[in-house]
Image (tube, rainbow, N blue to C red):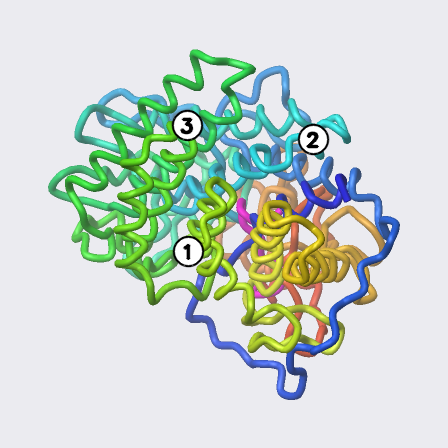
């Protein structure tokens, strides 16, 4: 079980499609089984290998000067000219999905999730000798987020230009990040797409999630680097104060660089991010004022306890606070979410057992929920029936991902793993770029429609998932199934 826990945690990063409103088909005849999945008594798969490769995936997404810890020959330094208006160093962090955008909300949520993985299950990472690697990966993200704090009023909420009107810019570039400035459509650099969050252009979602990520990370660095931990905690408090003082959503922003964020990452509400940030600050400080504040924001988010994602945090808030307090109110909130997934619940399953919420990112929804359930089960004690349901569900979803459905959904792992993920730099790397200098339209046609396998293996990437009938098209043009995000691993 020790090795099962951290990989479930890592798989939680898959949560959710970029387009929440994508057209989808529900499974027509497969209700949630009333019979629990039988968890194998011994591991079915090499979970240590999956953890290793999942962490390796983040190296494929890194921005900036990679330094001596560069682990992939096909990735090099990039975004070295990414400097903010106020001189802030924006070279680091992680690129999102197949592209080179740094979207504030999902990027910060990725870091929060990674930090929670380590916070909840450190012994699992130690058991497979990956704790230092996980910590270094989290720090790569929080270092960038700290640099996004330009001054007491300005925070970088986005870096990059995804599109100008109907012209794709970042989305229309199909080469490697290392050569972005040379070939990008319209010649627009990453720094041309900076969007600052401030008192007159608020985003409680972005600031709240950044605060949560820093508070969570401060917890896992307390022993390893106390000074770093203390600095992160203070930044978290400051950002939380800004987020609550100047409340508002980027969905109402008129900033030109945030308009595509509203399309690709539409935020439903922001009070759940404020509850989330307050919950993590309570975890880091044990100050009851943050728990009280979290309760207030929970009440304002009560209708949003049906999804756990970069957008919807309430199930995570309930679960985190329950693990910290064992309070029955938080337990009930978490269980209200879980019951739809437990045997006989309302969430439909595919014929082979995947909890299926939609055709875009179906594996992510399931694995994110599994991660929360493992935290819950650990807290209530594995002897309870509800804990058994949680462990059973989590194991079922994980084993589906790793091969129980007849294929692996993790690139570079197991049987029949994907070979054509929708990922640009593993197809067109700076060390193997056959169409270098060609028209971007022609490059896009080749990327989408060529049957050539990606030239480099994107180890550890989790595919979006199958259709409702468990089928899968290993094809870059079917990006609703083959796309992956920085939060799906």
Q: According to the image, label 2 marks what residue?
A: 123
Compute the Cα span from label 2 to label 1: 29 Å
Q: Magenta span: helix, strand or loop, mainly? A: loop
64 above or below 309? above
> Magenta span covers which residues?
480-489
Magenta highlight on residue 486: yes
Camera-nearest residue between 420 and 40: 40
Which label number is shown at residue 329? Answer: 1
Camera-nearest residue between 318 and 50: 318
Which label number is shown at residue 172? Answer: none
Element type at marker 1?
Answer: helix
Q: Earlier in the sequence, mark 3 or mark 2?
A: 2
> Residue 153 placed where, x, y %?
17, 30
Which label number is shown at residue 144? Answer: 3
Residue 233 shown left or right of residue 256 in the figure: right
Element type at marker 3?
Answer: helix
Q: Earlier in the sequence, mark 3 or mark 1?
A: 3
Camera-nearest residue between 11 and 415: 11
């Amino acid at each position: 079980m020790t090795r099962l826990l951290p990989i479930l945690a890592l798989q939680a990063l898959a949560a959710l499609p970029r387009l929440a409103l994508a057209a989808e088909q529900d499974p027509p005849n497969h209700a949630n089984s009333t019979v629990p999945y039988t968890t194998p008594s011994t591991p079915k798969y090499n979970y240590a290998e999956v953890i290793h490769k999942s962490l390796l995936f983040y190296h494929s997404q890194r921005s900036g000067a990679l330094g001596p810890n560069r682990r992939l020959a096909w990735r090099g330094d990039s975004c070295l000219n990414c400097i903010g208006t106020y001189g802030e160093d924006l070279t680091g962090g992680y690129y999102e999905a197949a592209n080179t955008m740094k979207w504030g909300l999902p990027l910060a949520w990725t870091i929060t999730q990674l930090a929670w993985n380590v916070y909840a299950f450190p012994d699992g990472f130690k058991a497979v000798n990956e704790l230092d690697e996980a910590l270094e990966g989290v720090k790569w993200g929080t270092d960038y987020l700290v640099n996004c704090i330009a001054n007491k009023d300005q925070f970088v909420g986005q870096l990059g230009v995804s599109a100008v009107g109907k012209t794709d810019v970042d989305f229309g570039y199909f080469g490697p990040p290392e050569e972005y400035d040379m070939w990008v459509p319209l010649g627009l650099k990453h720094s041309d797409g900076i969007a600052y969050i401030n008192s007159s252009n608020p985003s409680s979602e972005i600031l709240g999630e950044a605060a949560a990520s820093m508070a969570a990370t401060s917890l896992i660095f307390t022993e390893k680097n106390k000074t770093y931990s203390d600095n992160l905690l203070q930044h978290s408090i400051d950002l939380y104060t800004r987020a609550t003082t100047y409340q508002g959503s980027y969905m109402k922003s008129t900033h030109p660089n945030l308009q595509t964020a509203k399309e690709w990452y539409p935020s439903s509400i922001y009070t759940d991010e404020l509850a989330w940030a307050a919950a993590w600050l309570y975890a880091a400080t044990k100050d009851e004022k943050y728990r009280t504040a979290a309760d207030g924001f929970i009440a304002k988010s009560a209708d949003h306890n049906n999804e756990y994602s970069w957008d919807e945090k309430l199930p995570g808030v309930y679960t985190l606070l329950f693990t910290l307090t064992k309070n029955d109110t938080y337990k009930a909130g978490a269980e209200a979410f879980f019951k739809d997934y437990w045997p006989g619940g309302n969430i439909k399953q595919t014929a082979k057992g995947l909890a299926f919420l939609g055709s875009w990112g179906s594996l992510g929804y399931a694995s994110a929920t599994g991660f929360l359930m493992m935290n819950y089960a650990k807290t209530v004690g594995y002897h309870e029936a509800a804990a058994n349901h949680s462990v059973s569900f989590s194991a079922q979803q994980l084993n589906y991902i790793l091969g129980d459905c007849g294929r692996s959904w993790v690139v570079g792992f197991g049987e029949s793993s994907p070979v054509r993920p929708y990922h640009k730099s593993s197809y067109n790397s700076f060390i193997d770029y056959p169409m270098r200098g060609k028209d971007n339209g022609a490059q896009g046609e080749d990327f989408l429609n060529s049957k050539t396998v990606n030239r480099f293996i994107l180890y550890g990437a989790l595919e979006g998932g199958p259709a409702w009938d468990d089928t899968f098209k290993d094809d870059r043009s079917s990006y609703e199934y083959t796309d992956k995000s920085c939060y799906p691993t």
